[in-house]
Image (cartoon, helix red, strand yellow):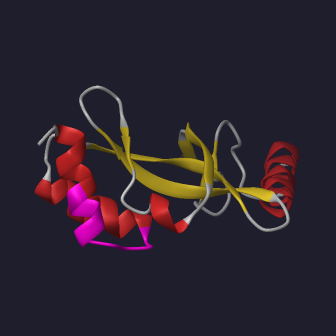
Amino acid sequence: MGKIDKYLLWIMNNSSNESRKATIIMKGQFPELKRIKGVIEIETLTTTIKCTHWWLKDEENNIIDPTANHYKILNYYEEKFIKCYTCGKFCLGDHHFCSENCENLYLSKLSISLLS
């Protein structure tokens, strides 16, 4: 049985729809795998959306996703996550604010401190 086959067999016997938890459990069984947090692009009935997701990679960079059978996944994107300067929530990519409100609040506090 090849490496990919043993991962697929494990996935078939350990179905989960929660990617964070599933990847933690699977990595416990297969320590050679690396957990990745990123974004997937999935197809719904009416549109495509991007959402935060966890998956694993093997030594050859093959994607091993224990929850892939729950979604029609179009693409995987590894993303860096940065904490929002205002509230501390995680933001994708190079965005330093999770929302326009947090950015405006930060800028208003910065303006007040510069004027003082």
Q: Is residue 101 above or below residue 4?
A: below
Q: Is residue 105 magenta?
A: no
Horizontal side of residue 7 vs 48, given as left or right: left
Horizontal side of residue 116 vs 75, given as left or right: right
Decide which of 109, 47 is in the foreground and name it.
47
Residue at screen point 39% across, 52% down: 65
Q: In this view, does 5 lie above or below 46?
A: above
Horizontal side of residue 107 vs 26, given as left or right: right
Decide which of 54, 70 is in the foreground and name it.
70
Decide which of 19, 89 is in the foreground and name it.
19
* Quarter location, residue 22: bottom left
Q: Can residue 28 be seen in this view?
A: yes
* Quarter location, residue 99: bottom right
Residue at screen point 85% across, 66% down: 46
- Where's the N terminus, which quadrant? top left
* Quarter location, residue 59: top left
The magenta segment is 9-18
Give coordinates of residue 67: x percent, y percent.
43, 63
Residue at screen point 14% across, 50% down: 30
Decide which of 77, 112 is in the foreground and name it.
77
Give coordinates of residue 42: x percent, y percent.
67, 56
Horizontal side of residue 5 vs 75, given as left or right: left
Q: Residue furthest top?
A: 60
Give coordinates of residue 52: x percent, y percent.
57, 57
Residue at screen point 43% across, 72% down: 18
Q: Is residue 83 visible?
A: no
